[in-house]
Amino acid sequence: MKITKICCIGAGYVGGPTMAVIAQKCPHIQVTVVDLNEERIAAWNDENVDNIPIYEPGLSEVVAVARGRNLFFSTDVEKAIDEAQIIFISVNTPTKTYGKGKGMAADLKYIELCARQIARISKDNKIVVEKSTLPVRTAEAIKSILDNTGNGVQFQILSNPEFLAEGTAVQDLLNPDRILIGGDPSDDGQKAIQALVDVYSNWVAADKIVTTNVWSSELSKLTANAFLAQRISSINAMSELCEKTGADVNEVARAIGMDSRIGSKFLKASVGFGGSCFQKDILNLVYIAKSYGLNEVADYWEQVIILNDHQKRRFSNNIVQTLYNTVSDKKITFLGWAFKKDTNDTRESAAIYVADDLINENAKIAVYDPKVSRKKVLADLDYLDTRAASKNETSILSFESPYEACAGAHAIAILTEWNEFVQYDWQKIYDSMQKPAFVFDGRNILDGPTLEAIGFVYQSIGS
Ligand code: UDX
Ligand code: ADP
């Protein structure tokens, strides 16, 4: 089948960048990204490409090339579904906040709505691709909805999980380690796989495109994220031991990372991993294991989350303890709020939980992040629903610049590893702070000895 029209439902952190790169690399394919959220679509269509709703290095350049040529953003979901031969589903699958599986299972209501809409609208055969991370065997549910509510047309369901990391999305899409496509072993299933392989072949080498059955593909995505998160919890567990013994976690990470069987990536101790994927996917894995009665498997993976929660709490406890067991009415400055550098995404960011703990202790917090507004900080805290919004409002301070954010503070906590923090004039910051001036480096990015020479009391994770 020659593919000329693709549609993607969901213009978020996955759908937006992925479709932009497909459009850039496949000028002969019309790519339409649709979303129910009118504000989001309007931002994607903003005349000034710097105002697109997602910040990713290099993304606005890709959008500038393809938008209006063969890349379109629209709220007309029905038209886009009707015209497309391949439909990507890239809607959010948050952890359920109610009912069975609450706090663990993925909430598939948005996926189901999409499937029902696709079934109702489609008048010819379609390939439906799961792009969102989904629990194993979701494809079966999608297929059942499509086959039982559709207009008698044929649907092929493929699983094509996205492995991009935020902050490096464009590079990851342009040079992926692998593209994974799972489909049905039948002839029609294999033809659908081939159609999608042909799209990626426009820029990805054949030996990097892996095809499997649907379930292997779905489970591989959960497994990849679980393994990556597990490495972070493993090094974070060692960071606590290092603090007690006088070992330095950075030295330990370097020493073990040189073992080619272990490898050097994802060994950076931190205040804890965040982001929309790791916690959600592991909880999902735990839920699936439990639902098959595999309690030891479930407990094994759950420990990765338990350790991550411990690491965040340990960081906030340490701030309180070090500041003489009280932070009440003290100003504490957060440098960074996003869950990692080079993104404006704050989902599950460790900063949210550290702030929550400190507000419980009546601290006043000035949050500076180059890509996150005070409004978003307040929305993230309100979403936790720990206390009245008015208390969050009075606890999160306003200011004009990062230097003003630090002035008068008792302590600075580094929550995100933005490059610009390293470049700051730390002498000037020291001079403007309460003494003793503390820095809690949750990302191990600052030069400790230099800060100590200025006069700071400097503490970093795991040393
Ligand atoms: C992750 C996976 O990497 C990606 O393949 C998948 O598609 C989606 O989930 P993402 O969440 O965007 O990507 O970012 P990632 O770079 O994996 O970082 C996740 C969290 O772990 C961040 O909070 C980051 O700061 C933290 N981290 C990462 C560490 O604390 N230490 C490390 O060594 C690496
Ligand atoms: P991700 O990080 O997985 O991309 P996001 O939350 O950034 O998640 O994006 C998911 C997008 O999907 C949101 O913009 C949301 O409005 C959109 N969405 C959810 N359900 C539907 C639907 N039924 N039709 C169209 N768009 C939807």
Image (tube, rainbow, N blue to C red):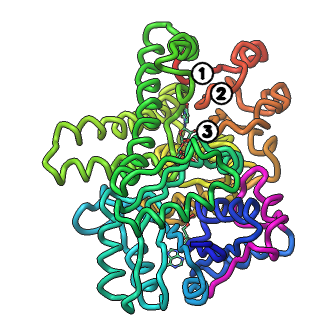
Alpha-carbon span between mark 1 and mark 3: 13 Å
**Do we see residue 413 in this rendering?**
yes
Residues at marks 2 and 1 touching, judged by CB atoms closer than 8 Å: yes
Q: Which mark is residue 459?
A: 1
Q: Which residues are magenta?
A: 49-76
Q: Quadrant of residue 417?
A: top right
Residue 162 appears left or right of 434: left
Image spot of residue 179 (x, y percent):
55, 49
Q: Amino acid at mark 1?
A: Gln
Give the total number of marks visible in the rendering: 3
Instruction: Tell me if residue 140 comes above or below residue 200 in the rendering.
Output: below
Ligand 1 contact, mark 3 (Cβ < 8 Å): no
The residue that disc 2 covers is 439
Q: Quadrant of residue 185?
A: bottom left
Which quadrant holds the C terminus? top right
Alpha-carbon span between mark 3 and mark 2: 11 Å
Q: Viewer-proximal residue, 376 or 346?
A: 346
Residues at marks 3 and 2 touching, judged by CB atoms closer than 8 Å: no
The residue that disc 3 covers is 415
Q: Nearer the viewer, mark 1 or mark 3?
A: 3
Instruction: Tell me if residue 384 comes above or below residue 233 in the rendering.
Output: below
Q: Amino acid at mark 3?
A: Leu
The residue lying at 59 percent from left, 49 percent from top is: 164
